[in-house]
Image (cartoon, rainbow, N blue to C red):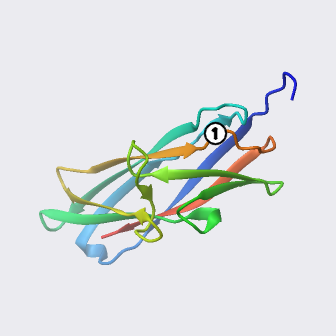
Amino acid sequence: MTGHLKKVTITTTFILCLLYQNVLAAQCNITSTPMNFGAYDPMSTVPLTATGSFSISCKPNKQIFNITLQLTSGNSGSYSQRNMVSGGGDQLFYNIYANAAQTSILGDGSGGSVSLTQIVSRQAPWDLTFYGQIPALQNVTPGVYNDLLTATILW
C-alpha cells in the first residue's frame, strides 16, 4: 500500500435481556451505554480500545439484593476470541473485558470468561464499566463491522 490508509468503522451492540425470578421481589432499572470503537486503522500498531457501561439500580423489598451480569459470546460462539463481521463476511477480532487491565473476559462464567456479581441496595446502585479491545494489524477490508451480544441480568 502506498500512502493509502484503510479505516474500518465498527460498533458492538448490546441487547438487554432481563430474566425475572420474582417480579414482586424488586423493581430494577437498567441502562447501558453501548461500546463504539469508531474507526479502526489496520495499519496501526496500537490496539484500538473502547469502553461501555451498565447502570443497574433496584428497589428490593429486602435491604440488599444480589445481582449477576452475564454477556453472550456473540457471532463467534467463543469467549476466547469474539469477532465482528462486515456485510461482506470479513471478520474483525476483538474482546470485551470486565477490568481495565483486560485480563478477565466478560461472559457467562464458562469458556474462560467471568460473570460479575454485585450486591445492590436502594442506596447503592451498580455502575459497571466494561472494556473492549481490537488487536492491532488485522488485515480487513473497509466497511462497517458489528457483533450482537446479549447481556443477561439475574437476580
From the viewer's perspective, is 140 left or right of 120? right
Residue shown at 58%/37% (left/top)? Answer: 47
Position in image of residue 91 (x %, y %): 73, 54
Residue shown at 67%/44% (left/top)? Answer: 10
Q: Is residue 110 above or below residue 135?
A: below
Position in image of residue 37 (x %, y %): 59, 39
Position in image of residue 137 (x %, y %): 69, 39
71 or 83: nearer the viewer: 83
In the displayed orientation, state which residue is furthest to the bottom: 21
Q: Residues within 10 Å of mark 1 (few under 14, many from 20)?
A: some
Query: In the rendered structure, which amino acid carries the disc numbered 1?
Result: Ala
Residue shown at 13%/67% (left/top)? Answer: 62
From the viewer's perspective, is 110 left or right of 138? left
145 or 28: nearer the viewer: 145
Quadrant where the N terminus lies?
Answer: top right
Q: Is residue 148 visible?
A: yes
Q: Which residue is mark 1?
A: 136
In which image quadrant can residue 24 be found? bottom left
From the viewer's perspective, is 128 left or right of 7? left
Q: Is residue 34 above or below residue 107?
A: above
Position in image of residue 30 (x %, y %): 38, 55
